[in-house]
Every structure is written in C-alpha cells, then in structure tokens.
Image: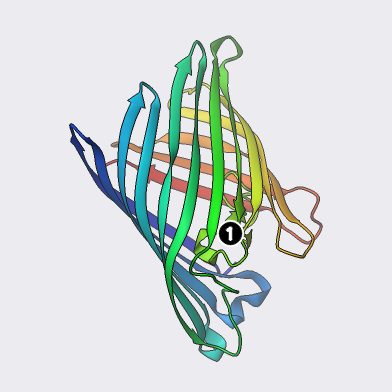
Amino acid sequence: RGGHYVGANGGLSKATPYGLFSARISQTQFKVGGDNRELDQNGQVTKLDGEWSYVLQPGLTSYTGIGYTRQRSSIGMFNWDDTIGSTALKAGLRLRQTHQKWNYGGDLGIEQGLSLQRTVRAPGLLLGEADAHYSLASINADATLQVPEWYGSLSLSGGGQKGSSGTPTGSQFYVGGPGRGLSYHTGVYSAASGYYGSIQWTTVPWHDISAFLGLEGGVVQPEGLDSISAKSVHVGARFALPGRAVGQLGYASPIGDANAKGRMTFFLSGQF
C-alpha cells in the first residue's frame, strides 16, 4: 500500500553479414509502501547496453557487449540519496532449441567491471559497498512442455549468479518479483550471489483466457551473513486484449514467512 514499481524498456537491432548489432535501454522506478511509506524510500535504475551477437550454429549464439548502469536510492524524508554509475564488459552464450513437445533455452554469461562513479549525500552508503572492477558469472535456463492431452503446458525456469565482493547493487542478484517470489516487491533482497527457480502450469486458452498456478522463489547469499529467501505461490489468469496486448491478473501468497503478506498482481504487456 502506497508503493509502486514501474518499468519500461526498448531497443533497436541491425542484422549484418558479420552478426547482429543491437542497443537496448531500460528504466525502472520504485517507491516503498507499507508501514515505512512515510520515509519516502524510492529509487531508479537505468541500463544502457550495446551488443554484438553471432550465430555459431542453429540455436546457439555468442554475444559480446558493453553496458552502463546508473542506480539511485533515496530516502526523501531526510533528503538522503546515493547514486552509482558503473560500466562493464559482458560476454556469453545463448541457447534456444525445440525438441518434440519441449521448447528450451539458456544463457551463460560473464561480466567484468571497468569503471565506477559515485555521489553520496547521506550519512552512510545507501547502496552498500561497490568495486569498480567487480566480476561475476551467471547462468539461466528455461523450458516449456506442451501437453495438449492435459489441456495445458508446464513451464520451468531457474538460474543463479556468483559475484565478487563489491558487486554494485545494479548488477547484484535479487529475489522478489516475477519468477523470484511475486508476493514480495521486485528486488526486495539482493546480494552478489544467489539462485532462483520457478514452476508453473498454464491451461490452454478458453475464449482468449487461460488460468495458471505456480510456485516460485529465490535465495540471496550476502557475504558473511545468513542466506535470505523469498518464496511464493501464484494463481491467476491471462487474457488477450485488443491489438497485440496481453494482461495478467493474479494473487501471490508468501510461503514460510509469517511477516509477509499476500498481494494482488497485475501485468500488462504489448508489442508495437
């Protein structure tokens, strides 16, 4: 209550005989609600990425790129804020295949920090320690099994990240949000290292409406501290909207956390 999370992204790409060149931008803004909403805790994350990718063989693509992340965290009640801008090199492999009733894929990547700028107007570091030359490795995978005889499909996803000490918050692994504990706000906990997983059953559409039921969650592993988890059960429906838009309405309830509360969820996506 009293909080929000808003995100938007876009990109451009150009195919050439030497590979695919692409540029992407994304921005998210949030404000913490609930019992602490009077503190006016808010933040913003902007990401700019340039990438070159090349198809090694059907379904397998290599990529190399450079990214810039700017993150700001503020506590409006006290006029405190902390802003970090970091640049990093990125490289990895992407896989996407279809086999019989399965559609599956994954991403194996590494990231090396190059530079970092920081402005702090607060008694402490709101975004924690940050090292310009951090490094990390990550892996993500997903799979969908179409089961028409059961009138639906089964979706699985999971992955993890191992980061060095001082990984900036904007590159840290997080839990909370879609696929990582939807009863919590996105990025409620983060650390250099962690892992996540989800499983979801979705029915075949009926009059452009399909129901779903899923379990999802993740764990972050702060350096020198106990691990922290966020787990949820999520139920709801997806529905087609005019044009090429899709809506989703659901309810997510926390698992094993007496202090967390369930919440209604709504998503809207479209292609233009």
| Foreground pick, 90 / 103 | 90
Q: Nearer the viewer, residue 154 or 151?
A: 154
Q: Which residue is mark 1?
A: 187
Residue shown at the point (45%, 18%) measured from the top left? 98
**Residue 90 in the image: above or below residue 171:** above
* Residue appearing at x 47%, y 47% in the figure: 267
- Across and down, in percent, residue 249 comes to 53, 43
Quadrant location, the C terminus: top left
Vertical arrangement, residue 33 with respect to residue 238, above or below: below
What colouring does the structure picture have? rainbow
| Residue appearing at x 45%, y 21% in the figure | 97
Q: Is residue 2 left or right of residue 116?
A: right
Helix, strand or loop at mark 1: loop
Above or below residue 122? Residue 37 is above
Is 194 placed left or right of 106 in the picture?
Answer: right
Q: How many marks?
A: 1
- Answer with the quarter of the image where residue 141 lies: top right
Residue 162 placement (x, y as % from top left): 62, 51
Mark 1 closeness class: few <14, some 14–19, many ≥20 residues within 10 Å: some
Rendering coords of residue 54 (x, y %): 31, 34
Q: Quadrant of the N terminus?
A: bottom right
In which quadrant of the rendered view does residue 151 lie?
top right
Q: Amino acid at mark 1?
A: Gly
| The one of 29 and 89 positioned closer to us in this rendering | 89
Between 131 and 168, the residue placed more toward the observer is 131
Image quarter of residue 261: bottom right
Query: In the image, residue 89 lies at what x, y percent?
Result: 40, 55
